[in-house]
Amino acid sequence: MGTASADLDPTPAAGRPRNGGAIMTGTGDLGRRLIHHRERLGLTREQVAARAEMSAGYVQYLEEHADMPDTGSLHRLANALDTTMDELLGGGRERPPGRGPAMAHPSLEVLGEDECRRLIEPGGIGRVAFSGSHGPTVLPVNYRMHGGAVVFRTAHGGPMDQDLRSGVVGVEILIAFEVDHIDETRREGWSVLVQGAAHHVPEEEAAATAGAGVTPWAGGERHLYVRIVPQQITGRRIRGL
């Protein structure tokens, strides 16, 4: 395990690591998390290095190699990236977020529609809520905003194909779509609720809708585009004072 101090160039001399083992050139889990949090904050490697009081070369090394810094360096990196050591190490990957206590005096802010749209504009993962054949149903989907509407993909003949059809020509089912973000470190977060009709995009419109660039993580044959044109958008934000 690498134990380089903050001011040392981590690149091993003569192509060999300091610990005497073979160099692992594939980016590991820590490296991917470092890159994720750095890009989340819009920081360069040099900016992260300055915050963490270490060399930019060492930050690059940790991002690109499956190695682990000493505890002190990991702590400084977590502070520099506004996260925790546990998060950088993936300690909470399998548990739901938000288990910690609330801040002493939290405030709840009602968000306007423009702010709600700004928050969900980048796309990501949202939750579709509808009355399914087996009762109330909530399913996660990858979505993008396209032409002011929420767009996601599903499978022909699947639950969100059949259950979101009214069976009456020209009549669409009203559904809810929710997106949220939780910052466990600050005990803050926001949620946005979109309500609108589920429109199954016909084949003749699919090419234009494909411009949204939405890609389902679940993979498979998910070629049916569903579009939600918002009829109402509301949101809330929790802040810690």
Image: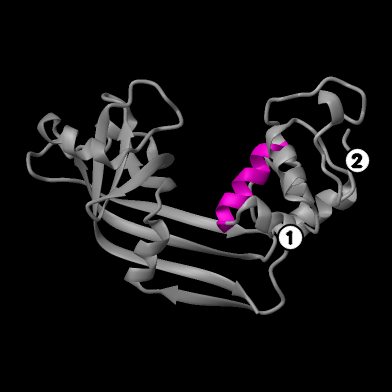
Residue 11 appears left or right of 210: right
Residue underneath mark 1: 50
| Observer able to see residue 135 | yes
Q: Nearer the viewer, residue 142 or 234?
A: 142
**Which secondary structure lies at badge 1?**
helix
Residue 152 appears left or right of 119: left
Q: Residue type at mark 1: give it.
A: Ala
Among the two numbered marks 1 and 2 on one chain, the one whose residue lies closer to the N terminus: 2
Q: Residue type at mark 2: give it.
A: Thr
Q: Which mark is residue 37?
A: none
The C terminus: image quadrant? bottom right
Q: Which range of residues does the magenta coloring cover?
A: 30-42
**Which secondary structure lies at badge 2?**
loop
Residue found 45% across the figure and 28% down from its top: 218
Residue underneath mark 2: 3
Q: Nearer the viewer, mark 1 or mark 2?
A: 1
The location of residue 15, given as percent across then percent down, is: 81, 24
Q: Nearer the viewer, residue 83 or 165?
A: 83
The location of residue 187, given as percent across then percent down, is: 66, 65
Q: Main secondary structure of the magenta part?
A: helix
